């Protein structure tokens, strides 16, 4: 019997939502780590019972939790994130140099093949790796030491490395995205990196087409097409079909091309989803309507998905890590809101229903399809 | 025996009930008490002070004998009542919203 497990990180704890393959009824377990900010939880693709969670508060700092039983029980593992060598400086909001300082883990990305290997994207932007199931962490410092590093500056939410995508075919290739530096790619398993931002245009920086400085909000890839990536940028929805060498805008008829998450249908690599947000200062949907937009053409042509979603007086946000898909047929789509709702569609977005209504503000949503 | 009272979240994390009692070798200072605390409960490493610089986290406060000891030097002697175990060292999460 197949099933689905939805891992929800919120401002005040983590929740695990489970359902059978029909996805009609849901059980909610939690809060785990009540009172803590749970920026992200994610399961190992190689072992569905192995989960990792990033737990933090402003008072007590960062912890990493690991579960070996699908989220029923947890144990704290290593939380020592130390930058490699002399950290150096990046730019602060006012343009002055500021030393790199670890603040928190934004995103955890378990290896596609090894449940004991996991990557962590952190603020101030850097990539760490553990090969012992989270007990110890080492920085892959070739990224932060890129020659442009001293010129990276934070976005409004901090200078965070929030997206990590492993190439399912080429084990040495990986993409990351940093607000507000842009997208980067390694082709040697993380030793060296280069910006892959050609084609991006950001009017908020002095040179709109600069090599770095773009506020990339999210990247998404379908595993069957590792050279095609989709991007929700601060403004603009973009795609590349050559592994990031060049990007083109595919915002098309979206009511706003500002937003945070973007994701790809599990079985249709040209079907993608975004949640348009009104603007960079008005972090809620246009017209007070909560609408997911779907493109079946890999961008450019978009349709609003509204059935089951509130269509009046909605002033919520959906954050960059708060959308995910399952791999059942039809594909399930899930997203969480700043108002504590988690919505799910069991028919690829045609219709929606809340599967949790009153959680704390949702920071992240991940989905496991259980066989 | 030094007595330490942790904030609720850290009591849960360390899986302790009320006070923590610690054998602290040598002088009773913030540093020696925190060293002993982290040795007894490794999960607390990084939650009270930075793991590299050992600086107190900004929203962590240390109170005892109705005094705020947070800004005392790490190697300053703790009050005699704490050193004798007559009073606990209170570790407090600062009132900072949340």
Image (cartoon, coloured by chain):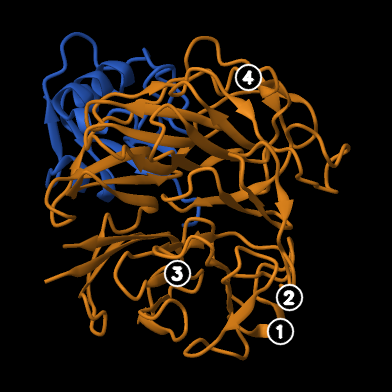
Label 1 sits on a secondary structure element that is helix
- Residue named by callout 4: A146
Q: Mark 1 lies on which chain?
A: A
Give the numbered dot on residue A255.
2
Q: Distance between the residues labelled 4 and 2?
A: 36 Å
Circle 3 crowding by C-alpha within 10 Å: few under 14, some 14–19, many from 20: many
Indicate the position of residue A114 as horizontal and vertical percent values.
Answer: 23, 34
Question: Same chain, marks 3 and 1?
Answer: yes
Number of the front mark, 2 or 1: 2
Q: Of label 3 and label 1, which has the lower sequence position?
A: 1
- Residue named by callout 1: A287
Number of the front mark, 3 or 2: 2
Q: How far apart are marks 3 and 1 (CA)?
A: 19 Å
Image-quadrant location for residue B74: top left
Compared with A19, B84 (above or below) is above
Q: Say if mark 4 contacts mark 2, CB within 8 Å.
A: no
- Residue named by callout 3: A335
Label 2 sits on a secondary structure element that is loop
User: What hue does chain B carry in this figure?
Assistant: blue
């Amino acid at each position: 019997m197949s099933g689905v497990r939805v891992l929800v990180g919120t401002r005040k704890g983590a929740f695990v939502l489970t359902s059978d393959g029909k996805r009609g009824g849901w059980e909610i377990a939690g809060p785990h780590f009540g009172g803590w900010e749970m920026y992200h939880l994610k399961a190992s693709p190689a072992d569905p019972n192995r989960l990792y969670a990033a737990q933090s508060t402003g008072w007590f700092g960062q912890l990493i939790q690991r579960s070996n039983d699908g989220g029923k029980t947890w144990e704290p593992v290593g939380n020592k994130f130390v930058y490699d060598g002399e950290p150096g400086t990046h730019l602060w909001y006012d343009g002055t140099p500021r030393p790199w300082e670890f603040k928190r883990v934004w995103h955890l990305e378990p290896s596609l093949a090894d449940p004991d290997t996991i990557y962590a994207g952190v603020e101030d932007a850097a990539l760490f790796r553990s090969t012992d199931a989270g007990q110890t962490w080492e920085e892959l410092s070739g990224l932060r030491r890129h020659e442009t590093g001293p010129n990276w500056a934070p976005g409004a939410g901090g200078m965070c490395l929030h997206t990590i995508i492993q190439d399912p075919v080429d084990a040495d290739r990986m993409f990351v995205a940093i607000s507000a530096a842009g997208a980067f790619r390694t082709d040697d398993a993380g030793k060296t990196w280069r910006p892959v931002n050609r084609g991006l245009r950001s009017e908020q920086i002095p040179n709109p087409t600069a090599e770095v400085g773009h506020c990339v909000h999210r990247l998404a890839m379908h595993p069957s097409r590792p050279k095609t990536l989709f991007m929700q940028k601060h403004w603009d929805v973009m795609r590349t079909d050559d592994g990031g060498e060049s990007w083109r805008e595919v915002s098309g008829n979206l009511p706003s091309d500002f937003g945070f998450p973007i994701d790809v249908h599990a079985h249709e690599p040209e079907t993608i989803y975004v949640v348009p947000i009104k603007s960079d200062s008005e972090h809620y949907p246009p017209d007070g309507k909560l609408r997911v937009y779907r493109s079946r053409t890999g961008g450019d042509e978009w349709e609003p998905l509204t059935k089951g979603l509130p269509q009046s007086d909605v002033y919520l946000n959906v954050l960059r890590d708060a959308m995910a898909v399952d791999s059942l047929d039809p594909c399930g789509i899930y997203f969480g809101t700043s108002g504590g709702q988690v919505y799910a569609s069991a028919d690829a977005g045609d219709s929606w229903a809340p599967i949790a209504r009153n959680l704390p503000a949702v920071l992240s949503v991940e989905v496991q399809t259980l066989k | 025996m030094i007595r330490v009272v942790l904030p609720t979240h850290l009591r849960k994390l360390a899986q302790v009930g009320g006070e923590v009692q610690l054998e602290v070798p040598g002088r009773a200072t913030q540093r020696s008490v925190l060293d002993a605390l982290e040795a007894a409960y490794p999960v607390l490493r990084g939650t009270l002070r930075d793991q590299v610089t050992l600086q107190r986290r900004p929203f962590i406060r240390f109170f005892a004998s109705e005094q705020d000891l947070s800004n005392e030097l790490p190697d300053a002697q703790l009050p005699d009542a704490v050193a004798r175990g007559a009073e606990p060292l209170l570790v407090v999460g600062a009132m900072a919203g949340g």
